[in-house]
Amino acid sequence: MNGRKGKIEGVLIQPLKVNSDERGFLMEILRSDDPWFQKFGQAYISLNYPGVIRAWHWHEKQTDFWVVARGMVKAVMYDRRPDSPTFGTLQEVFLGDHHRVLLTIPPEVAHGYKTIGTEASLLINFPTEPYNRSQPDELRLPYDAPEIPYDWDIEFR
């Protein structure tokens, strides 16, 4: 991978509290009184099979709020904003069963994810804008686009 790794300006990773007892658990994801809450656009869930990569895309107006309800994903972001102090930075975040967090992805930051492990993942998104079918706020590149210096294979450290 040629891009530098680090924290991208405006990306937030908020730990989520899981309240467990013998019945199961309850986990709050996003509240309108959270300091990072912006506005509600819509909510949706994506089921993703192991190894599936959904990348790359970004939005001009929309902020995404991701949580993984089941399984694990490797979310990757690339700061493509020329005026950002973190322009050209890549950031990886692991979300799901083993890391319960809410991930905030600001506009203009390219992002995608890969389901890791042996089971399907369920990713829930609470974007700030409803999807506009006639004029989608979504720009795309293939997962292996040369403009984003990222290799989705497992990285051995």
Image (cartoon, grey):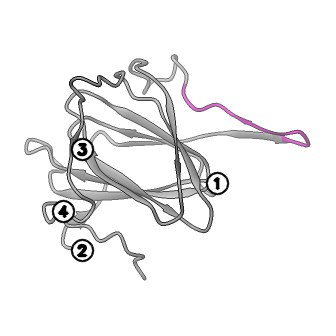
Residue under label 2, please give it. Answer: 1
Q: Amino acid at mark 4?
A: Ala
Instruction: Classify mark 1: residues with Cα within 10 Å, few (<14), some (14-19) or many (20+).
Output: some
Give the mark nearer the N terminus: 3 vs 1.
1
Real-space Cα separation, disc 3 to disc 4, in angstroms:
15 Å
Q: Amino acid at mark 1?
A: Asp
Q: Give residue 148's position: percent from left, percent from top.
A: 18, 61
SS state under label 4: loop
Do the CB atoms of the residues marked 2 and 4 lie less than 8 Å apart? no
SS state under label 2: loop
The residue under the point 53% across, 59% down is: 49
Q: Which quarter of the figure is the N terminus placed in?
A: bottom left
Residue under label 3, please give it. Answer: 109
Real-space Cα separation, disc 1 to disc 2, in angstroms:
27 Å
Horizontal placement of 136 versus 103: left or right?
left
Instruction: Classify mark 4: residues with Cα within 10 Å, few (<14), some (14-19) or many (20+).
Output: few
Between label 2 and label 4, give the one nearer the viewer: 4
Give the magenta range. 21-30
Between label 4 and label 1, give the one nearer the viewer: 4
The residue under the point 51% across, 17% down is: 32
Q: How many marks?
A: 4
Q: Which mark is residue 97?
A: 1
Real-space Cα separation, disc 2 to disc 3, in angstroms:
18 Å
Do the CB atoms of the residues marked 3 and 1 lie less than 8 Å apart? no
